[in-house]
Image (cartoon, rainbow, N blue to C red):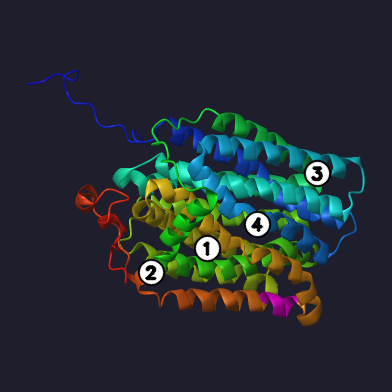
Amino acid sequence: MTSAADSPRPPRSFGWAGRNYSLLTAAAVVTNLGSHGSLIAAAFAVLDAGGDGGDVGLVAAARTLPLVLFLLIGGAVADRLPRHRVMVAANALNCLSQGAFATLVLAGEPQLWQMMLLTALGGTGQAFFSPAAEGMLMSSVDGEQAGRAFALFRMAMQGAALGGAALGGALVAAIGPGWVLAADAAAFAVAGALRSFLDVSHIPPREPGGGMLADLREGWREFAGRPWLWGIVVQFSIANAVVGAADAVYGPLVARDHLGGAGPWGLALACFGAGTVVGALLMTRWKPRRLLLVGTLCVFPLALPSAALAVPVPVTVLCAVMVLTGVTVEVFGVSWMTALHQEIPEDKLSRVSAYDWFGSVALVPPATALAGPAELAFGRTSALWGCSALVVVVTAAVLCVPGVRNLTRRTKQVALNAPAPGSADAERPVGGLG
C-alpha cells in the first residue's frame, strides 16, 4: 500500500503553457483592452470633429491600406529576423502613433488628414506585427494540445476585447475619445515590454536564402498549393470588407441615429466579444473532426449583424445577434488556427500568415472608403442588406472547395507518424485534400 506522498501526482492541466505562451497571452490581453476601445474612440473623434460617414470610412481605410501594402514584406521579415523583435518594434510604432492621435484630439480639433496619417502609421505597425505574432504563437505550442491552446489564447484575447469595447464605449461617452486613445497608446507600451522577454532560442536559425523576393516566392508556393487555404482567404477577403464597412462606418451612424450613441454601440460590440469568449470556451472541449467544414458553416451567422443594423432592431436584439455571431465566428477562428498549425511548416508560418492577412484585408480599404458614397447612392438600409447578402454568397461558394469539406484533424497517432516539415511527403495534401 502506498502513501499519499508516494502516489503519482496528477499531470498539470496547463503544463504545455510555457513562458512564451504565457507572455503572448498576457500581452494580447493588454493590447485588446486598449485597441477595441480605440476603434470606437477613433470613429467618434472623427464625428466630434465635424466629420460624416464618408470621413469615418476614410480614416478606417487609412489604417487598413498599409496592411495591404506591407503585410507580405512583414511576413518575410518575421520569418527571417527574430519574431519577438519585429513585434516589439511594431508595438513601439503603434504606441507613438496612438499617443500623437490622442494628443491631437485632446488639444483641439484634429484635421482629417492628420487622423488619416496617424492611423496609417498604426496600420503599418500592424502589418509587421500580425505575421510575426501568429508565427510566434503557433511555434509556442505543439502536439495534440495545440487546438486547446489556441482556444484558450483566443478566449483571453476576446475577453479583453469584450471589456475594452464596453469600457471604451462608456469612456468615450463620459470623457471623450482622446483619453481612450491615450490609454491605447499606454497599452501598446506595456505589451511591447512584455513581448521583449519572449525566447526564440527554440526556433532553428534560417538557412541563408536568396533574399526577400525568394522568401516571398517560397511563401506564395506554400499558399497557392493549398486550395482550401486560398479559397477561404478569398472568402474572407470579401466578407471582411463588407463586415468591416458595416462595423466601422454604418454601425456608429446607426448607433447615433437610432440606438443612443457610443454607449449602446460599445455594448453591442462587447456582446460580440462575449460571444467569442463563449465560442473559445466551447472549443477548449469540442474538437470537430472536419475542421474547416464545421468552421465554414459557422461563418454564415456573420451576415446577421448587418441585417440587424439594416432593420434597425432594438439594442437588446442587436446584442443577442452579436453574441450568437461571436460564438460561431470563434468556432471558425480556432478551427482555422488549428488547421494552419497542423498543415504549415514552422519556418513558413509567418509568410503564409502574411498571405492570409493580405487576402483577408485587401478589400477593406476600398470597402470602407466607398461605404459613405454607397450610402448616398443606395441608402444605408440597402447598403447594409447588400453586406449581409455578400457574406452568405461567398461562404456558400467556398463550400464547393473539396479541401474545405474534407480536411480532417489529425489523430495523435497520425501526428506522431507524420513526416517532418519540409520533407517531400510533408508537402503532399492530407485529410482528403484534392
Q: Amino acid at mark 1?
A: Leu
Q: Quadrant of residue 2?
A: top left
> Which residue is painted at 34% across and 42% down in the image?
142
| Mark 4 or mark 1: whose residue is earlier in sequence | 4
Residue 348: where, in percent of width, then height? 43, 50
- Image quarter where the C terminus lies is bottom left
| Mark 4 or mark 3: whose residue is earlier in sequence | 4
Secondary structure beneath disc 2?
A: helix
Q: Is residue 140 left or right of residue 416?
A: right
Q: CA distance from mark 4 to mark 2?
A: 28 Å
| Mark 3 or mark 2: whose residue is earlier in sequence | 3
> Which residue is painted at 74% across and 70% down in the image?
371
| Furthest residue toward front | 210
- The segment highlighted magenta reads 380-384
Q: Amino acid at mark 4?
A: Leu
Mark 4 lies on residue: 69
Mark 1 lies on residue: 324
Residue 92: where, in percent of width, then height? 67, 36
Q: Is residue 284 left or right of residue 352?
A: left
Q: Nearer the viewer, mark 4 or mark 3?
A: 4
Q: Nearer the viewer, mark 4 or mark 2?
A: 4
Circles 4 and 1: CB atoms closer than 8 Å: no
Q: CA distance from mark 1 to mark 2?
A: 23 Å
Mark 2 lies on residue: 404
Q: CA distance from mark 4 to mark 1?
A: 33 Å
Local packing at callout 4 (Cα closer than 10 Å; few below 14, some 14-19, many 20+) is some
Secondary structure beneath disc 1?
A: helix
Mark 3 lies on residue: 101
Residue 187: where, in percent of width, then height? 66, 36
